[in-house]
Image (cartoon, grey):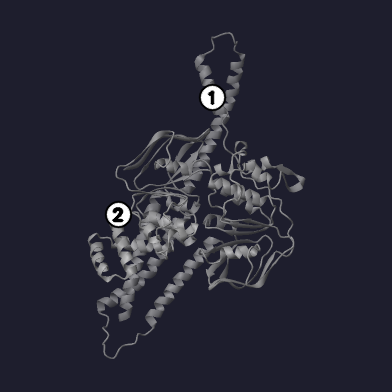
């Protein structure tokens, strides 16, 4: 069933054409991602589809009475609403009942709770109520009575995501859904969307997310749409094939063009007997032959300052804000060419740690010693702080007109901008006209112009397109200084770091050798071990028996059931781990992804059901 049909859609801003004559459709159950370079018009396309911006021409048709939910890249929530009111701001009667029930719970109104309990049962809304609690819990929205206007940007983003997920919509349209989410939240959302029957259209730069969730990729390039029926790996493979074929076509056209050009030049100007068809064909041939594949690359010509023997040393450093402990008696010596990743939940102390490292904040006790040769380059999450009416080239010239490179070479501000994927026609654009990703790329350029030898990148991939990220990764791989990365981009972390600081809260930091994937594997094993230990404790710990009560013994049938569950639970846990690993491998077809995603949901439900029954029977055992 067709959910969305787009025909001949065109949009431009002044002389800048974003896309032209786009035609595509989305069927029920499809999970589609739009990928493109920053500034190509991804977010504008979504807004045109939803009628939030008018296209220059073309039509957009959704199936009648289709329930659609849209999450914008910048949240648009009423600051006066509570978190609960914002999340449940829908017209569905079941949602209204759940909101009233939650309000009655908070008010401890037993009379109202009784009436609402009956209504929720009649509307069969208890499953939805469980879903509400699950989403609020996973996205860590515990302060449901807090005003939206009092939340941080990341919290608002999570509220907007929760609102969309609880909308009971048939078609979700998401613009950068993983921004400002913890890694646990991203993995949960990945599994949730993979296993669901929802129809999905999204813009995201999270490559693992694209790999696992999506079955169709739409690439917005050259003002048109290229469609790839497969996940992200399939898209990369077929995109390379398409570009090779196009390059071959261009080369053949160039050879023919030279011959036809010679023929055109040799014809007498005064004679009108030239073959009209051949002249017309020459015009078409010229268009093909003069095409240029977009081979721009982001070049980072870093001239790193010399590193001494002493880098950065933490000596028994502690830091707290009131009762919240950020760091407790922490000691560590950074090494040359160290590649450290930092992970942990929001509020665990990651940003405080970086601020102390760069002397923006002082420790409560202990000391931090910084080597004499250290030059920090700190790329933070904040957008570039310059006058929005400045021209792009003036932002660079504000730092330096010429930038020294290695071996005595230098680059002008204009040349440097071109290497950062800012073509000449963008140099005199005002900063306020840049997209979010273009502004972040400009900020990264200014950081690297300082020639740092100790780079700190706090969420460097937010709003950067996947093409810029892949080249950034290649250049950071060659960086000879020390590197710290804080990122929720699992793919980026796996490629960039060789050990992790895991911020566990209460000032505790665990140093783990390996990349993010290694960390998650170890964490999953630890959780399994803890679960098994917990089960053994339950079985082995005798329960006190009251003198006045005679404890019922387990029946023969219950004993058989208990033994069967004990055999099945480890098998289900193993299958769960295997399915999760296969879904993240990137080696599955679309059909296999859907099949294994559904199976994973069933296995998780079975584990929960059997665990509860096991606990009941263990009381009798």
For numbered disc 1, what is the local secondary structure?
A: helix
Asked whether residue 581 is in view, the answer is: no
Farthest right residue in view: 408
Q: Earlier in the sequence, mark 1 or mark 2?
A: 2
Disc on res. 473:
none
> Who is closer to the viewer here, 574 or 357?
357
Q: Which residue is mark 1?
A: 285
Q: Which residue is mark 2?
A: 92
Nearer to us of marks 1 and 2 is: 2
The quarter holding residue 311 reads: bottom right
Check the picture and name the quadrant holding the N terminus: top left
> Who is closer to the viewer here, 303 or 518?
303
- The residue shown at (69%, 57%) is 453
Q: How many marks?
A: 2
- The residue shown at (34%, 64%) is 605
> Who is closer to the viewer here, 498 or 302?
302
Asked whether residue 395 is in view, the answer is: yes
Query: In this rendering, is residue 419 above or below 114?
Result: above
């Amino acid at each position: 069933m067709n959910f969305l049909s787009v025909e001949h859609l065109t949009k431009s801003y002044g002389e800048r054409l974003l896309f032209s004559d786009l035609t595509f459709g989305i069927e029920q159950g499809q999970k589609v991602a739009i990928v493109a370079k920053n500034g190509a018009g991804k977010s504008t396309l979504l807004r045109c589809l939803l009628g939030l911006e008018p296209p220059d021409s073309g039509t957009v048709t959704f199936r009648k009475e289709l329930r659609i939910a849209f999450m914008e890249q910048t949240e648009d929530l009423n600051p006066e609403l509570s978190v609960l009111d914002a999340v449940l701001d829908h017209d569905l009667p079941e949602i209204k009942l759940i909101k009233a029930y939650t309000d009655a719970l908070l008010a401890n109104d037993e009379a109202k709770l009784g009436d609402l309990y009956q209504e929720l049962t009649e509307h069969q809304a208890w499953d939805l109520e469980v879903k509400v609690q699950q989403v609020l819990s996973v996205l860590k929205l515990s302060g449901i009575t807090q005003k939206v206007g009092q939340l941080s940007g990341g919290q608002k983003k999570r509220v907007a995501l929760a609102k969309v997920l609880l909308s009971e919509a048939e078609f979700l349209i998401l613009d950068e859904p993983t921004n400002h989410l913890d890694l646990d939240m991203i993995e949960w959302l990945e599994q949730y969307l993979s296993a669901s029957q929802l129809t999905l259209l999204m813009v995201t730069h999270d490559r693992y997310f694209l790999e696992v969730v999506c079955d169709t990729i739409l690439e917005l390039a050259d003002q048109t749409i290229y469609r790839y029926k497969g996940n992200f790996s399939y898209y990369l493979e077929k995109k390379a094939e398409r570009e090779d074929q196009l390059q071959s076509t261009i080369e053949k056209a160039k050879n023919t063009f030279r011959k036809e050009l010679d023929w055109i030049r040799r014809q007498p100007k005064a004679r009108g007997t030239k073959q009209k068809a051949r002249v017309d064909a020459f015009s078409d041939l010229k268009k093909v032959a003069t095409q240029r594949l977009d081979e721009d690359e982001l070049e980072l010509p870093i001239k790193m300052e010399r590193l001494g023997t002493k880098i950065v040393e933490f000596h028994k450093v502690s830091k707290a804000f009131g009762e919240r402990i950020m760091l407790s008696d922490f000691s560590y010596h950074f090494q040359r060419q160290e590649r450290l990743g930092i992970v942990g939940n929001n509020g665990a102390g990651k940003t405080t740690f970086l601020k102390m490292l760069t002397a923006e904040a002082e420790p409560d006790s202990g000391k931090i010693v910084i080597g004499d040769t250290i030059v920090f380059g700190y790329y933070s999450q904040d957008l570039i702080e310059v006058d929005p009416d400045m021209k792009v080239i003036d932002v660079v010239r504000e730092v330096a007109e010429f930038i020294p490179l290695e071996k005595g070479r230098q680059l002008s501000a204009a040349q440097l901008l071109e290497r950062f994927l800012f073509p000449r026609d963008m140099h005199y654009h005002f900063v306020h006209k840049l997209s979010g990703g273009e502004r972040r790329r400009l900020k990264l350029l200014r950081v690297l112009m300082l020639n740092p030898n100790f780079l700190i990148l706090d969420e460097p991939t937010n709003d950067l397109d996947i093409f810029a990220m892949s080249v950034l990764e290649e250049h950071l791989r060659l960086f000879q200084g020390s590197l710290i990365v804080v990122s929720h981009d699992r793919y980026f972390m796996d490629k960039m770091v060789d050990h992790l600081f895991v911020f566990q809260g209460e000032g505790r930091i665990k140093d783990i050798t390996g990349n993010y994937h290694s960390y998650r594997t170890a964490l999953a094993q630890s959780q399994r071990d803890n679960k098994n230990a917990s089960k053994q404790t339950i079985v082995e710990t005798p329960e006190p028996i009251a003198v006045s009560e005679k404890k019922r013994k387990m029946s023969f049938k219950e004993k058989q059931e208990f033994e069967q569950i004990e055999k099945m639970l480890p098998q289900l846990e193993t299958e769960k781990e295997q399915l999760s690993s296969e879904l993240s491998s990137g080696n599955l077809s679309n059909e296999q992804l859907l099949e294994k995603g559904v199976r994973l949901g069933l296995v998780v439900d079975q584990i929960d059901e059997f665990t509860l029954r096991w606990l009941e029977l263990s009381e009798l055992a």
